[in-house]
Image: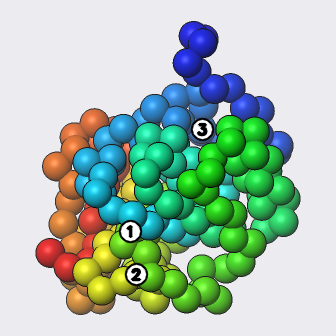
Amino acid sequence: MNSNTLHVDAPVGVTARCQGATALESNAQPTTSIFARRASVADIGSGAGIPGIPLAITLPASQFSLIEPRRARVAFLEAVVDDLRLSNVAVLPARAEDLGGRFQVCVARAFSSAPVSWKAAERLLAPGGILVYWGGESFDPAVLAEEGVPWRLSPHSDLARTGPLVIMGPQ
C-alpha cells in the first residue's frame, strides 16, 4: 500500500463481502467525467459510502449528501467523513423516499433494482438531473424500457466486469 492509499476497516455489515481495497479506485475514476461540472450529488442508500466518498474526494468542488437510514452505517459514514475532513460531504440519516431535494446527480450502487432506484432518485433530482446507476451483472435494459425510464449506457468500458454504468434521466 502506498502513502496515497486510504485503508479503512469497515465494521461487519457495512460493506458487501466482495468489496476490497480497490473500491476507492474502481468506483470513482470512471464516473467523474459524467458529472464533473455538477454541484450537488446525492448517494442514495450510501451504505459504506461507495461511491459517494470516493467521488467526494475526487470532486472536491461538488457537494455530496450520503443518504443512509441505518444507524450503524450512518455512524460509520460520519466517522469516515470526519477522519478524512471532507467538508463537501453531509451524512443524512434518512430514507431517500422520505427526503426532498434538488440534486443535479444521484448515484446508486447496490441500492435496489433499476426502476426502484429511479423512482427514489426522481423525487430528489432537480429538473434535468440524472441518476448514475451501477447496473451489475444482472442488469436488464428491458425493465427500464417497460417502465418508460429514459436511459443510456455510459461509454466507460472499465466497469464492464461488474456490469454497465447506466445513466437515467433526460437524454
Name the quarter where the C terminus is drawn. bottom left
Label ID, residue 125: 2
| Apparent side of residue 128 relative to residue 112 in the rendered image (left or right) | left
Which callout, 1 or 2, points at the residue further toward the start of the chain? 1
* Distance from the alpha carbon under mark 2 to that under mark 3: 28 Å
| Apparent side of residue 58 relative to residue 155 in the rendered image (left or right) | right
Q: Nearer the viewer, residue 107 or 127?
A: 127
Name the quarter where the N terminus is drawn. top right
Element at badge 1?
Answer: strand
Residue 85's image quarter? top right
Quickly name the residue at label 3: 19
Label ID, residue 105: 1
Rendered position, 86 above or below 35: above
Rendered position, 41 above or below 129: above
> Horizontal and vertical percent for residue 4?
55, 18
Rendered position, 132 above or below 23: below
Q: Residue at x 22, y 73 (%)?
A: 151
Label ID, residue 158: none
Q: Residue at x 62, y 51 (%)?
A: 87
Is mark 2 in CB contact (under 8 Å) with mark 3?
no
Q: Residue at x 63, y 69 (%)?
A: 67
> Horizontal and vertical percent for residue 98?
64, 89
